[in-house]
Amino acid sequence: MRWALVKVSLAVTAMVVVAFAVPLGLVIREMARDRAFSNAEREAAAVAPALSITTDREQLERVVASAGSDAGMAVHIPASGAGADGGGAADIGRQRATDEDIAAVRRMGRASTTEVGGGSTLLQPVALSSGEIAVVEVYVPESEVTNGVGTAWAVLAAVGAALIVGSVAVADRLGVRMVQPARRLVEGAHELGEGRLGARVPVEGPDELRRAAVAFNSMADQVVQLLANERELAADLSHRLRTPLTVLRLNAASLGDGPAAEQTRAAVEQLEREVDTIIRTARDAKPQTAVAGPGAGCDAAEVVRERMGFWSALAEDEGRKWRVAGADRPVRIPVARTDLAASLDALLGNVFRHTAEGTAFAVDLHNGEDAVIVLVSDAGTGIPDPEAAMARGRGSGTDGSTGLGLDIVRRMAESTGGDVRIGASVLGGTEVRIWIQLDGRTAPARRGHRGAVRRRRQSRAPAPAPAAPAGRDH
């Protein structure tokens, strides 16, 4: 907007300057020409009285010398007029005009101008006492015709340039007054989009931008209010779960001893902790943002061991074979512990939910230089359409599956610059690959990492497994 105003002002001012300066420059040139020829006419008029009285050469030379320069003035007297006074002089001074031009002036009886080398001449007819016509020739050099024109044009150009620069400066200042409020509005929108709900825009500038700022601030207030209402609603809904959880915990306490009872009580305690976390998070008025940097994140190997310890009890009850690889030493990742645990629980829960009892599964952890890869695979029937499954993960919800589990995993991976892919497992079923980027860069599709993970996994596997299809990458 600022540059648009400057360009418009520049174009308009330039057109105005051209429209006035060019005609004015031409007028100045004509005025200089008229001034030069007016001086020539005055010099010729000073000789006319003497010619009407006498044609004596000496007297006329004195008159010419007193009226002007003998180098720039000439007097042409007919031979008959000169002889009547006994002077015998026909021409005085240097002749520059042609004889034809002089004869034409005598014949027409009026003044005329003609172009000669280096300038122009004024031919002025004068009647002699004898009735003949003499011609006074006054030379007007080109320098006298253009005297002062260059200076006047330079002044006009300077004035025009000053007008253009001044108009551009004024337009730029006006543009700044309009652009700054618009820029603050854009910055406020970016801040609000980044989650800084306290972003507001000062109401200033032109009337249209002031109304836009008022509308933006009103919208931001509405967003804050809606988010507060959503948090209250989530907290209230989560709080309603405490009553059935209390009953479930009391019933679990009465189950007595045994692996199933311990597992049930542990699951109830975890569910109660999750509900409490949801309530505390929802009640928090300040949105929390992920913290990245040195020391942030968790030990992925520890989380994998912990969650596999939880799911192994249920796997033994259903007769499922399971294994863990790559979790024997610490693997730091820039992901919160709760987020990684929720992702593993979502994927392992899908294995138990969508495969038959007795289906084997495995969790492999690979620590690379710039990324950590978590592979969750099973020996089930596989997923016919992985793209549709990922679409459900983005919220479409078809075939009786909400897809929330895959959505949790996808958001966790993408928060680090990684991704999630679904493909065929070496166990014969489905494999979900979670690529967790360590440096925040976008994760490329690399085949070498996948091959390294499989070789490592096969070397650690307690039982042989069929090889993966060649050239397949997930």
Image (spheres, rainbow, N blue to C red):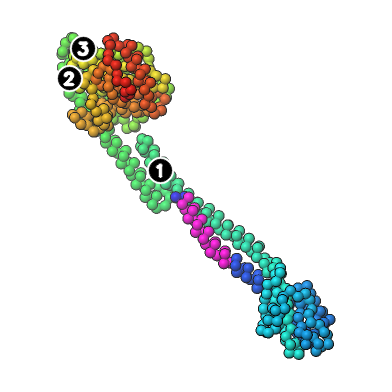
Q: Which residue is mark 2?
A: 248
Query: Which is more N-terminal, label 2 or label 3?
Result: 2
Q: Is residue 21 magenta?
A: yes
Does 458 sit left or right of 100 as displayed? left
Kindly identify the amino acid type of the residue bearing the numbered disc 1.
Val
Is disc 3 placed on a helix, strand or loop?
A: helix
Tell me what residue is drawn at x 31 percent, y 23 percent.
472
Q: Main secondary structure of the magenta part?
A: helix
Q: Position of residue 201 (x, y in %)?
A: 40, 43
Mark 3–mark 2 distance (CA, rounded to whole Å): 23 Å
Does 226 sit left or right of 442 as displayed? left
* Badge 3 density bin: few <14, some 14–19, many ≥20, Cα 10 Å: few
Q: Residue 345, can we see it?
A: no
Q: Which residues are magenta?
A: 3-24
Tell me what residue is drawn at x 40 percent, y 27 percent.
440
Which of the two discs, 3 and 2, sits closer to the camera? 3
Of 158 and 194, the residue lying toward us: 158
Kindly identify the amino acid type of the residue bearing the numbered disc 2.
Leu
Mark 1–mark 2 distance (CA, rounded to whole Å): 52 Å
Q: Which residue is mark 1?
A: 186
Q: Which residue is mark 3?
A: 316
| Residue 350, above or below 125 | above
